[in-house]
Amino acid sequence: MKAETAMTYQLDKLIGQIKKLPTINAVAFQVIQLCSDSDTSISQLVKVISVDQSLTSQVLRIANSSYFNYPRKITTLERAIVILGFNLLRDIAVSIAIYSLYKGFSAQSGVDLGAQWRHSITTAFTGRAIAEKLDPAAKEVLYIAGLLHDLGKLVELRLLPEEFPMLVEKSRQEGLRLDVVERRLLGFHHGDVGAALLERWNLPEKLHQSTRYHHYPEEFEGDPAVAGLVRQVYLANVVSHYLEGEQPGMEAVVAYDPDFTRYFSFSEEEFLGLVDYAQELIAQNQAFFDIIGS
């Protein structure tokens, strides 16, 4: 890493070391698959969650939190659905399922995993806000895609424990996005890594493609419907970074990604209107956001 030369890693070999990664709970995996399908029924989701006592207890713990302020204790998933509604139960379940991937990582890794998880949640909510404005039918899959889009960073952190923090630090020092530094020194970036993992897990193509191309939507060639999702996840990620930044206006967006105006022709007023809507949605769900984010 000291020399400015590419590191000798091959993506396939890196992903081939999957056994070194924290394993995803089988039930959590099923929840992600089910929640990716708009045709999933309440009974299917309840049946799967009920198998896992830990996941069930976590869902009920959140359902009984002060955020919902229900006067009586909720003791069953069926009752939680009645009180919370299917959509919110799905959000809770899939968020917990994906968060389970963060377990097993050391707080001493040199990478702020809490900030990374909060960014994923912000991107998920932002994706939903974008879908409500541009493509309402995609709002649930955009929520999941937002939660998953940076999963490759976890893979790199586990399989490249010395190199990854150095890549993160190099991106900070040079004022470049991490994916730009990764491409230069690794020959691939965290989107490629995350997508390869999701593909191995046999998750829907739209999820691994939106993960792979969330920094480079113009490079995707394929199903126009998937291309639309790729662009929306890219936009959700950009808006999420904008919300986390300190610099206002379109200049901040172009500074983050100079290619932004090639993908979207928003005026500054339109873009800021989308930002305001995303902020409004997050504010409406702030307590839930805080619970999941912590």
Image (tube, rainbow, N blue to C red):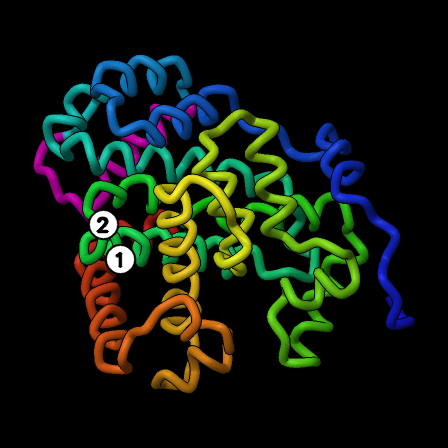
On the question of residue 76 being in view, the answer is: no
282 within the magenta span: no
Toward the viewer: 66 or 37?
A: 37
Task: From the image, tell me which residue sits under label 2.
Answer: 135
For the magenta stretch, what is the residue range?
Answer: 54-72
- Image quarter where the N terminus lies is bottom right
**Amino acid type assigned to the residue bearing label 1 in the image:** Ile
Local secondary structure at mark 1: helix
In this view, 45 is above or below 151? above
Nearer to us: label 1 or label 2 = 2
Q: Position of residue 182 (x, y in %)?
A: 71, 61
Query: Disc 1 or 2, which lies upstream in sequence?
Result: 1
Q: Residue furthest left?
A: 71
Local secondary structure at mark 2: loop
Q: Do the residues labelled 1 and 2 touch (CB within 8 Å)?
A: yes
Quadrant assignment, res 248: bottom left
**Amino acid type assigned to the residue bearing label 2 in the image:** Asp
